[in-house]
Structure formats: structure tokens, C-alpha cells
Image (cartoon, helix red, strand yellow):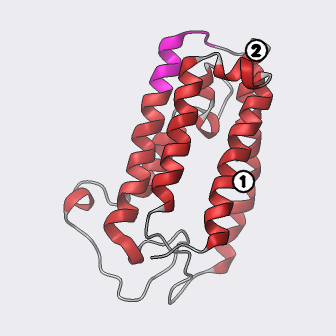
């Protein structure tokens, strides 16, 4: 599916905003990119964004969607913005930190595993995958491949991704900022 230009621009801008908040919280470009694991996670984040731009995901409300279930998007957006800045800030001021490079690299690995697990179902389901929880036309339950092992791999990918720390940055920053 060809992505709408607005969705493409929105994805890139949102990702850069998220990284920008972490960079700001850490004290600027020099302080952020002086840590190799943070450089790696920035490259990985933008790499996942680029892969996602080529995915066939849609934002169709499908045949039936409960629009009242969209309110968590606002709440999660606010938590995500705070989660981009606060762990970086606490790392900079050495508050609730685990200053150990192994922890940062573990966070990078967990983040990448979650990112791949999040995107993989989009490429498998193609037009049947929607960013909105809704029944899509022609929907058929998948029970082969990854779906024979995991019922909701995309959701699990989000959980795994965020298990790297609050909003996916804390563990990579070495912060103990609570989820």
C-alpha cells in the first residue's frame, strides 16, 4: 500500500521529536552521542522507522471500530513524551541510574527485538493489519508462522520494546526511572 505523504512525514517528525527530547534531556548532542549505545539506539530507531515506512500498514477504521477506544492514544502519547525526556534527564543528573554499559547494550538488544516483533506482523498481514483496533474487510484468523506461536505478536513487540525501560529509553540510558 502506498503511504499517504502526511503519514510518512508524521512518522519521521514524531521519531525525531522523540529522539530530540532524549537528546535534550541528556544535555545536548555531544553528551547524548558520546555514549555508543545511545548512538546505536538512535540509528536503530531511525532504521525501524525507515522499514516501517515501507510497510503496508493502514489506519482504516475497518468495518467496525469502537471510536471510544482511542482515548488511550492521547494518554500514551503524553507518557511517551515524558518517557523520552525524563530517563535522559535522570541519567544526566545521576538520579536513579545504573551506570553500566552492559545495561545500555542489553536495552539496545531488547529494543531491537521488540521493534522487529512489532513490524514483522505488519508485513505478514499486509492490508489486514491496521494501526487501529478494528475488524477489517476480508479478515481471516492467522494460525500459521509466528501466529502459530504468538496470538498477538505486534502487541508483544510493543511490550518487549518497552520492557527495555520506560517508553523504551530508560534501560538504554541506564536509568531506573519507573515505568
Does residue 162 appear left or right of residue 75 in this picture? left
Q: Is residue 36 magenta?
A: no
Q: Earlier in the sequence, mark 1 or mark 2?
A: 1
| Residues in magenta, as a range | 98-107
Q: Quadrant of the C terminus?
A: top right
- Measure the C-alpha gap from mark 1 to mark 2: 24 Å
Residue 11, position as x, y percentages in the image: 63, 58
- Answer above or below: position of 131 versus 113: below
Residue 7, percent from left and from top: 63, 68
The residue located at (50%, 52%) in the rendering is 50
Q: Main secondary structure of the magenta part?
A: helix
Residue 52: assigned label: none
Q: Quadrant of residue 86?
A: top right
Residue 145 spot, x, y in % from top left = 20, 60
What residue appears at the point 73 percent right and 18 percent down from the top-left corner? Answer: 31
Q: Tag 2's secondary structure? A: loop
Q: Is residue 138 left or right of residue 115?
A: left
What kind of element bears circle 1? helix
- Disc 1 target residue: 77
Q: Nearer the viewer, residue 68 or 107?
A: 107
Residue 95 numbered tag: 2
Characterize the local packing of mark 1: few (<14), some (14-19) or many (20 or more) Cα atoms within 10 angstroms. Answer: few
Q: Quadrant of residue 9?
A: bottom right
Amino acid at each position: 500500500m502506498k503511504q499517504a505523504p502526511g503519514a510518512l512525514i508524521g512518522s519521521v517528525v514524531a521519531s525525531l521529536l522523540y529522539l530530540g527530547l532524549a537528546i535534550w534531556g541528556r544535555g545536548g548532542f555531544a553528551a547524548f552521542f558520546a555514549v555508543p549505545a545511545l548512538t546505536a539506539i538512535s540509528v536503530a530507531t531511525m532504521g525501524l522507522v525507515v522499514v516501517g515506512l515501507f510497510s503496508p500498514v493502514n489506519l482504516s477504521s475497518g468495518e467496525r471500530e469502537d471510536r471510544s477506544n482511542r482515548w488511550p492514544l492521547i494518554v500514551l502519547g503524553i507518557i511517551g513524551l515524558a518517557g523520552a525526556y525524563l530517563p535522559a534527564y535522570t541519567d544526566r543528573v545521576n538520579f536513579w541510574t545504573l551506570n553500566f554499559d552492559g545495561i545500555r547494550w542489553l536495552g539496545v538488544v531488547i529494543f531491537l527485538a521488540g521493534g522487529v516483533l512489532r513490524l514483522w506482523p505488519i508485513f505478514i498481514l499486509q492490508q489486514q493489519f491496521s494501526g487501529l483496533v478494528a475488524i477489517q474487510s476480508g479478515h481471516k484468523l492467522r494460525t500459521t508462522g509466528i501466529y502459530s506461536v504468538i496470538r498477538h505478536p505486534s502487541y508483544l513487540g510493543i511490550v518487549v520494546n518497552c520492557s527495555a525501560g520506560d517508553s523504551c529509553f530508560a534501560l538504554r540510558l541506564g536509568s531506573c526511572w519507573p515505568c
